[in-house]
Amino acid sequence: MKTQLHTLIAAIAFAASAASLPALAANDHGSHGSHGAKAADAATEMTDGEIRKVDKENGKLTIKHAEIKSLDMPGMTMVFQVKDKAMLDKVQAGDKVKFKAASEAGKFTVTELEAVK
């Protein structure tokens, strides 16, 4: 239940922040040259996390993660779908990881994952 609540809160926060982007862009006249570069950096930046649970049956990972800048999401613990189920064989609960996530078809999905040694 807690995980579902965290996912719901994250989705609401994401939707609220996405709705405010046009207003912010309309008022941002001083950084035309650097704004695009910052957005591209955030989209390619890996996020630090720790695997809390691997659900191979459902293709999901529970990750305690730092801020995900590309999704404008604060650090929290939540459940993610994985883009490729082979990712689930690379990690186990307790592993430190770096990952990228995206919102795909309304679901937060891990698109890249690497274990940190």
Image: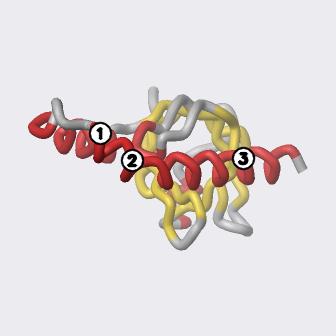
Which x, y percent locates residue 61?
A: 65, 52
Q: Are marks 1 and 2 in contact (CB under 8 Å)?
A: yes
Q: CA distance from mark 1 to mark 3?
A: 27 Å
Q: Residue 101 got which mark?
A: none
CA neighbours of label 2 inside 10 A, class few (<14), some (14 to 19), many (20+): few
* Residue 31 figure quarter: top left
Say which residue label 1 marks: 27
> Relative to residue 8, is residue 1 drawn left or right?
right
The type of residue carrying mark 3 is Ile
Say which residue label 3 marks: 9
* Residue 52 figure quarter: top right
The type of residue carrying mark 1 is Asn
- Identify the secondary structure beneath mark 1: helix
Q: Is residue 112 visible?
A: yes
> Which of 58 and 68 lies nearest the eye of the viewer?
68
The type of residue carrying mark 2 is Ala
* Residue 6 figure quarter: top right
Say which residue label 2 marks: 23
Residue at left offset 57%, top offset 55%: 15
> Which of 14 and 40 lies nearest the eye of the viewer?
14
The relative height of residue 76 versus residue 84 in the rendered view (above or below) is: above
**Quarter of the picture holding the C terminus:** top left
Q: Is residue 95 visible?
A: no
